[in-house]
Amino acid sequence: MKTILTGVKPTDLPHWGNYLGAMRPALDLAKAKDVKSALFIADYHALTTIHDPLIMKEMTYAVAATWVACGLDPQKAIIYRQSDVPETFELAWILSCFSSKGLMNRAHAYKAKVQANEEAGKSDLDFGVSMGLFTYPILMAADILLFSADEVPVGEDQIQHVEIARDIALRVNNTYGEILKLPKFVAQKNKTIVGLDGRKMSKSYNNHIPLFLESKKLRKMVMKIKTDSSPPEAPKDPSTSLIFDLYKEFATEEQIQDLRLSYEKGMAWGDAKQVLFELVDQKLSPMRIEFQKLMDDKSYLNQLLHEGSLKAREQGSQLLAQLRKAMGIGA
Ligand code: ADP
Ligand code: TRP
């Protein structure tokens, strides 16, 4: 049996990047017979940026509903709120005692913040850096190691965090023996989904397309995708077209070939966007309906999250007991 685990922060409504880069690959892996999976909502990670309680609560449900609407099978996969598994936070402390400060100094998110402060001419390079942000990779390591995950499907930007988890686990194991499983990341190379403005699709750049927008709004957003100024009849190069890249994510081989031909013959960008919109709208429509149903009545989600947290805690407490014993902590 192989265990996979991944989490998504409830910072906003999930977008195409989250779905195509992390959620869909994780759900695909979770379907295999010999795979046990934990797919969770990283609400305490979101606390590094989200301080509005209403947003935190609602977006936590939205991420849970997205997992379920996109095909999570609750009979097979465990879904839970990170905050409902307190063992995570005890493990995070233990791991912090085995994590050098230098390792955290090298983490991307922290480095980016320091660089931004430098560029803004701030005298305090740690301006705006909370300890939550600084030790973010340790909490993520706790999520992963508590569950003895073999594989962690993530987008490319999270690879470093999985490697840090591996580093920390090695240090603990060097001291106490092989207690923690060393995780591997699973990320498709060059699978970073690009947003409306040509940069990485991200909530922080506000260039993202939410996954479950209703048709009219979805069409409006798709029409905003950046293109060049070549005239409608000019042949277009699929390999440099964001519309084509996104289309490939949702289309069959045959549909991809058809659009390739239309590009070569010459097609207006507006028409290409319409083709993309129609395909995605049709593909996502059943999931969107399911998502809305779940969001309108949260009782099913509450029950799933509760059941999931019990299973996660059971597994987590076994690992913690083993670790406590090895460390000489407790009776
Ligand atoms: P955001 O960058 O929008 O805040 P998150 O940090 O919540 O997104 O990411 C959740 C998951 O989705 C992570 O595994 C991340 O790597 C993946 N992901 C986010 N944006 C993209 C993207 N543009 N392309 C591919 N994967 C992405
Ligand atoms: N840090 C991840 C993100 O920003 C979310 C996350 C938290 C996660 N804990 C995790 C992902 C454990 C994989 C495994 O997207």
Image: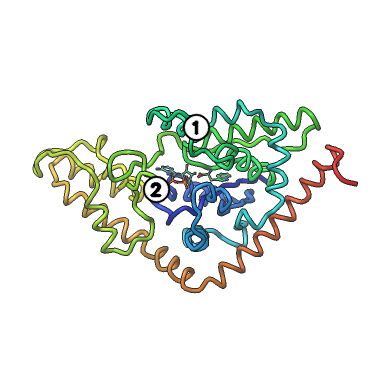
Number of callouts: 2
What residue is at 32 percent from the left and 56 percent from the top? 280
Mark 2 vs mark 1: which is more N-terminal?
Answer: 1
The amino acid marked with disc number 2 is Lys
Q: Is residue 81 left or right of residue 249?
A: right
Neighbourhood count class around disc 2 (C-alpha, 10 Å): few under 14, some 14–19, many 20 upward: some
Query: Is residue 65 depicted above or below 316 in this figure?
Result: below
Q: Position of residue 193 (x, y in %)?
A: 37, 42
- Compared to residue 151, the image places residue 86 above or below, namely below
Q: Give residue 162's position: percent from left, percent from top.
A: 58, 36
Residue at image x 52%, y 52%?
27
Tell which of 243 and 222 is nearer to you.
222
Q: Quadrant of ligand 2?
A: top right
Kind of residue sitting beneath label 1: His
Q: Mark 2 and mark 1 in contact? Answer it, CB < 8 Å.
A: no
Locate residue 204, reporting x and y percent: 39, 45
114 sits to left or right of 205: right
Q: Secondary structure at mark 1?
A: helix
- Ligand 1 within 8 A of label 2's CB? yes
- Neighbourhood count class around disc 1 (C-alpha, 10 Å): few under 14, some 14–19, many 20 upward: some
User: Residue 111: percent from the left, percent from the top?
Assistant: 49, 30
SS at circle 2: helix
* Rendering quarter of residue 121: top left
Q: What residue is rendered at 42% in x and 63% in y? A: 287
The mark found on residue 137 in the picture is none
Q: Is residue 98 above or below residue 76?
A: above
Residue 108: image tag: 1
Using the rendered view, name the quadrant where residue 143 is placed.
top right
Measure the alpha-carbon separation of dots 2 and 1.
Answer: 17 Å
The residue identified by callout 2 is 203
**In the displayed structure image, the side of residue 329 where residue 190 appears, left or right:** left
